[in-house]
Image: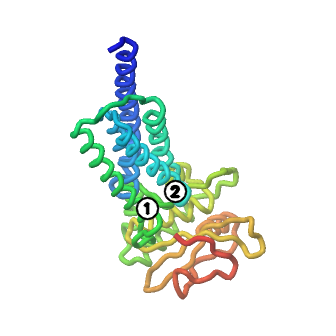
């Protein structure tokens, strides 16, 4: 074997290990950051596994073109699911999975030019890992587009962690019924939060830690926080996006919550601002169903 070829093989082998350790460290840090969410959000667990598991391809000595093609196809679908989750659920976290997968695709598609036959064990490992990732992709798709009990789900647009659940437990400590818990959460938000008139962003997404630490936000933040606090108490709650009939360019977000055998409309953002300015409150308004139309807003999404 020529020295140049031997050097190329050695370099490719070392680059694979370097990629593996770098991405393993990346996923380790990501896991530490998300650890408080994993207990409560199966969606984040799936997305994290979709980020972590493909890094195992780097420790497998894949030489043949068919096996490398399988890996690239798997990585492509993981990238697509990351983008889908980010756009549909308005979350930035899935894009972290996208970054990892993009790096892996560049390595296997461009940097890794090794050729030859794969060992049987390598083929088995690639196929087993591929099958497991395919199952995760299937469940991720169902979670985004076919969620069970979306009014109680954690990990889509509305995301909360263990600290949020502890806060909800504290707020509702002296409450016996769902109606009392909803009222306690509503009162706590009215008293403790204020509208952030200086907040501007191209991509609106809900960050529970940011909202609770700053005690500020906009309608999307308040509506998702209210939903998170209610859902953590097992109280069905939807977040609703809409635009005024006469001002279609202005978006607004509010809630629909279920208690006393009925769905209720409420606008926490409006009442936070109204309380601060001494105006009348929106309060709780009874609905015929969770998907009833609104007299002031054209509803674009209920989730």
Image location of residue 131, percent across then percent down: 31, 53
Q: Judge by depth and name the residue closer to the eye, 292 or 53.
A: 53
Image location of residue 301, percent across then percent down: 58, 70
Name the residue furthest bottom: 288
Q: Quadrant of residue 274?
A: bottom right
- Asked whether, in this view, residue 83 is left or right of residue 49, the answer is right
Image quadrant for the N terminus? top left
Q: Quadrant of residue 174?
A: bottom left
Q: In this view, does 230 lie above or below 61?
A: below
Count neighbours of disc 2 (C-alpha within 10 A) and say few if under 14, some if 14 to 19, many if 20 or more.
Answer: some
Q: Quadrant of residue 150?
A: bottom left
At horizontal 66% and vertical 51% (from top left) the residue drawn is: 202
In terms of secondary structure, where does tag 1 sit? Answer: helix
Marks 1 and 2: in contact by CB < 8 Å?
A: yes
Q: Which colour scheme is used?
A: rainbow
In terms of secondary structure, where does tag 2 sit? Answer: helix
Image location of residue 23, percent across then percent down: 40, 34
Does label 2 or label 1 sit earlier along the sequence? 2
- Asked whether, in this view, residue 29 is left or right of residue 205, the answer is left
Q: Judge by depth and name the residue closer to the eye, 169 or 199.
A: 199
Q: Name the residue under label 2.
A: 84
Q: Judge by depth and name the residue closer to the eye, 76 or 181.
A: 76
- Asked whether, in this view, residue 296 is left or right of residue 186, the answer is right
Residue 256, numbered circle? none
Q: Mark 1 points at which residue?
A: 141
At horizontal 37% and vertical 50% (from top left) the residue drawn is: 36
Name the residue furthest right: 246
Q: Is residue 280 above or below residue 44?
A: below
């Amino acid at each position: 074997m020529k020295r140049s070829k031997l050097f190329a093989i050695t370099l490719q082998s070392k680059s694979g290990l370097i990629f593996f350790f770098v991405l393993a460290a990346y996923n380790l840090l990501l896991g530490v950051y998300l650890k408080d969410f994993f207990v409560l959000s199966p969606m984040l667990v799936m997305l994290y596994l979709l980020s972590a598991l493909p890094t195992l391809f780097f420790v497998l000595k894949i030489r043949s073109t068919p096996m490398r093609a399988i890996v690239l196809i798997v990585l492509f679908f993981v990238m697509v699911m990351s983008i889908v989750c980010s756009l549909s659920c308005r979350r930035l976290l899935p894009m972290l999975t996208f970054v990892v997968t993009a790096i892996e695709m560049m390595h296997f598609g461009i940097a890794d030019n090794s050729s030859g036959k794969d060992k049987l064990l390598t083929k088995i490992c690639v196929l087993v890992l591929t099958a497991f990732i395919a199952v995760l992709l299937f469940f991720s798709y169902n979670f985004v587009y076919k969620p069970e009990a979306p009014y109680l789900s954690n990990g889509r647009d509305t995301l909360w962690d263990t600290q949020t659940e502890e806060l909800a437990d504290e707020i509702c400590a002296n409450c016996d019924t769902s109606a009392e818990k909803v009222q306690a959460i509503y009162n706590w938000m009215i008293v403790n939060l204020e509208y952030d008139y200086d907040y501007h962003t191209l991509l609106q997404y809900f960050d529970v830690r940011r909202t609770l630490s700053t005690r500020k936000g906009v309608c999307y933040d308040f509506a998702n926080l209210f939903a998170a606090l209610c859902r953590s108490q097992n109280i069905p709650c939807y977040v609703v996006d809409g635009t005024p009939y006469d001002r279609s360019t202005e978006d607004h977000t509010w809630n629909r919550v279920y208690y006393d055998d009925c769905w209720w409309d409420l606008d926490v953002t409006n009442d936070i601002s109204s309380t601060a300015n001494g105006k009348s409150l929106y309060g709780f308004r009874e609905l015929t169903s969770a998907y009833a139309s609104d007299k002031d807003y054209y509803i674009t999404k209920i989730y």
